[in-house]
Image (tube, grey):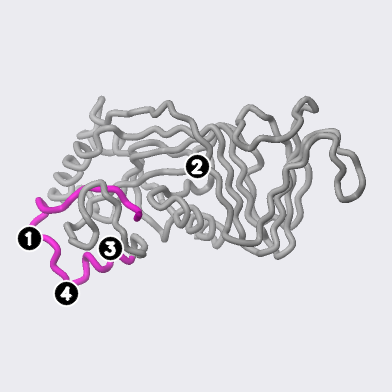
Amino acid sequence: MSKIANLYADEIKKHFKILYANWEPGGPLELGNYGFMDGNVFIPQGKLQDDFPEFNGNTIQIMQDPTKDQKEFKSEEGIEVILSAKGSVNPQGVSLTKALLEIKFSKKNSVYFNASGCTTTRIGNKAQVGDILKKLYKNDKWKKEYCVVTDLVKAEKAIVTISQSDNSAISFEADSPAVEKINLADASIKLSLSSEKNIGYKVPADEGVILLMGLCKIKNPFLWWGGGFKPQPLKMTESMMYKMENAPGIKTEESADELIFGQMGKD
């Protein structure tokens, strides 16, 4: 797994807690995809509806949340976001003919993330899906380390940038001179890349991008983790938890019937 993928995925997980990054942003991802985790990066292996007859038809129920919101964050330090209005004067003394968005980085490997017009689609019958997976696991048809994509967050417009040095920058301008000032929460404003310097990775104002996912998996009924769809509160990665749960000297359940299917992530 590339360094940039792990850097981005770790920052996303750190900020959104129970949501994980879709790497790469906008890559093909569907509810019911399953796979395993490499750190905080999801590695897809297949789709429940395609690989298991138990999920044929309408076994998986899809729910769409009509609410739209904005999701934005930046690394804790080293990032300055400047929104310049049309007609203002830039540091070079030039009057701007279009509204401008500038993102300046003073620290390497810093992440800026802005997603507007975000909607969430989820599996509405997670418990039923979990019951089927537990039966498959008992019949040696499912691996305990597998997790399932149960929630997807799609943005109408997304800007993601990662700095490559301690002196990085990227800027976008409004396509229309009618826009007086860029509102990052307004997904209808069209943006185009204006300039960049020392940017390690970018999603340049792409539209209709799947950015985030929620994951569920079969878990041991370990008292520390909590149960069901309440995420565990400890500061541990999924790989650390899996190793602890399945260590030879630790007994967490008498039989597979005691396993639970719940949300990954932490409060």
Where is residue 172 drawn, in percent x and y? Answer: 73, 41
Q: Where is mark 4, residue-wise? A: 249
- Residue pictured at 51% horizontal, 57% vertical: 11
Q: Residue at x 20, y 52 (%)?
A: 227
Q: Amino acid at mark 3?
A: Tyr
Q: Is residue 62 above or below residue 133?
A: above
Q: In the image shown, does 154 or 3 lie closer to the viewer?
A: 154
In the rendering, which numbered label is found on residue 242?
3
Give the answer, above or below, for where 177 lies relative to 21.
above
Q: What are the residue bounds of the magenta stretch? A: 240-267
Task: Quickly name the residue at label 1.
Answer: 254
Q: How many marks?
A: 4
Question: What residue is drawn where x is 38% and y is 50%?
Answer: 18
Q: Which label's residue is closer to the chain start, 4 or 2?
A: 2
Which secondary structure lies at badge 3?
helix
**Front residue of 42 and 136:** 42
Image quadrant for the C terminus? bottom left
Q: Position of residue 41 (x, y in %)?
A: 44, 54
The part of the image, by quadrant, that contains residue 150 is top left
Work out how far the residue at label 2 is from the one at label 1, CA to CA, in angstroms. 39 Å
- Judge left or right: residue 56 versus residue 131: right
Mark positioned earlier in the residue sequence (2 or 1): 2
Q: Is 252 included in the stretch rendered in magenta? A: yes
Q: Which residue is mark 2?
A: 211
Give the camera-side residue of 65 and 259.
Answer: 65
Please identify the residue farthest to the left as the structure is shown. 254
Sequence-wise, which precedes: disc 1 or disc 4?
4
Give the mark, 3 or 2, whose residue is nearer the N terminus: 2
Q: CA distance from mark 3 to mark 1?
A: 17 Å
SS at mark 4? loop
> How far is the residue under mark 4 from the one under mark 2?
39 Å
